């Protein structure tokens, strides 16, 4: 376990980012691993949808853990679990949930700073306590920071960066290993965050056609240490499945 955590931690190199193509079950884990992945990471959206739930901690924790155990059993790669807001109302409950994640074999977690169903961010001091308890398990804690959610970086970039960095410092001091900043492809903001963050920065991939990036190398140049893909692999797989089904139902053959 410790070796897996250390391996996972060492893969987070600013300027040479770890690329994670997010998975949702043991089957998708095997497919992604066979393609040359260095590590595996679940995305809560895909996990929930694959089981007939909706995203937002509606999947029972026992079910999440059982799924994680099947993923871990099928690979030697480090596995990170998207534990959403931590499955706990209190910091102590979050710590207990993360301890179970460790027992199930994970090397890391993603931990959000919004509670399920809420728009406002959890207060910095409260979230720091949740991270502190989560970090006691000794896993790589990727602290998600939703400051950019629903706010224009074009209009408020510097102020948003300042807010992110305030949280980054507090989260790092509490024991976070990495900082995950979704909901933005604003280049200047990403570069500024990477330059000043005390912990490695994770950015979610967004294609140029969707207002995103030219290539992963662009994020590497900013100093990003981890690139994840969120729900996109799940969506791509389901779209491909539907396309194949339509072809067959129309009298064709699978490609």
Image (cartoon, helix red, strand yellow):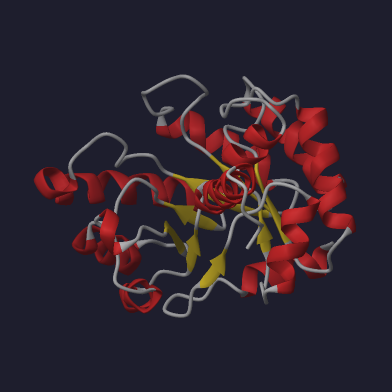
Residue at image location 57% in from the left, 58% down from the top: 177
Answer with the quarter of the image where residue 188 lies.
bottom left
For this orientation, the residue located farthest to the left is: 155
Q: Which image quadrant: the N terminus?
A: bottom right
**Up-down relation of residue 113 to residue 53 (above or below):** below
Q: Position of residue 229 (x, y in %)?
A: 50, 56
Residue at image location 46% in from the left, 54% down from the top: 179
Q: Position of residue 239 (x, y in %)?
A: 53, 47
Q: Which image quadrant: the C terminus?
A: bottom right
**Taking the image as drawn, is residue 164 in sight?**
yes
Q: Nearer the viewer, residue 169 or 113?
A: 113
Residue at image location 66% in from the left, 41% down from the top: 134
Q: Nearer the viewer, residue 195 or 149?
A: 149
Q: Is residue 186 left or right of residue 165?
A: left
Q: Position of residue 43 (x, y in %)?
A: 60, 46
**Taking the image as drawn, is residue 106 in sight?**
no
Q: Is residue 34 left or right of residue 195?
A: right
**Up-down relation of residue 147 to residue 247 (above or below):** above
Q: Is residue 247 left or right of residue 153?
A: right
For this orientation, the residue located farthest to the front is: 251
Q: Is residue 226 left or right of residue 109?
A: left
Q: Position of residue 32 (x, y in %)?
A: 68, 65
How many labels, in total? 0
**Up-down relation of residue 170 to residue 207 (above or below):** above
Q: Nearer the viewer, residue 67 or 92?
A: 67
For this orientation, the residue located farthest to the right is: 73
């Amino acid at each position: 376990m410790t070796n897996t955590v250390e391996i996972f931690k060492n893969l987070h190199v600013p300027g040479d980012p770890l690329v994670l193509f997010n998975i949702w079950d043991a089957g998708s884990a095997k497919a992604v691993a066979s393609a040359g992945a260095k590590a595996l990471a679940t995305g809560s959206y895909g996990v929930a949808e694959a089981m007939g739930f909706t995203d937002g901690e509606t999947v029972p924790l026992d079910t999440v853990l059982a799924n994680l155990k099947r993923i871990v059993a099928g690979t030697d790669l480090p596995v990170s679990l998207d534990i959403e807001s931590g499955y706990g109302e209190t910091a102590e409950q979050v710590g207990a949930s993360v301890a179970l994640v460790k027992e199930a074999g994970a090397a890391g977690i993603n931990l959000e700073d919004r509670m399920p169903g809420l728009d406002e961010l959890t207060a910095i001091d409260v979230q720091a306590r949740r991270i502190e308890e989560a970090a006691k398990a000794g896993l790589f804690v990727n602290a998600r920071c939703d400051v950019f959610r629903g706010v224009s970086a074009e209009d408020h970039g510097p102020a948003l960066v300042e807010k992110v960095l305030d949280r980054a410092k507090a989260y790092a001091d509490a024991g976070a290993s990495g900082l995950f900043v979704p909901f933005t492809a604003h280049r200047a903001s990403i570069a500024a965050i990477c330059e000043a963050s005390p912990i490695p920065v994770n950015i979610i991939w967004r294609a140029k056609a969707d207002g995103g990036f030219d290539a992963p190398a662009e994020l590497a140049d900013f100093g990003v240490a981890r690139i994840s893909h969120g729900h996109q692999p799940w969506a791509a797989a389901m779209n491909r499945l539907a396309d194949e089904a339509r072809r067959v139902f129309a009298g064709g053959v699978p490609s």
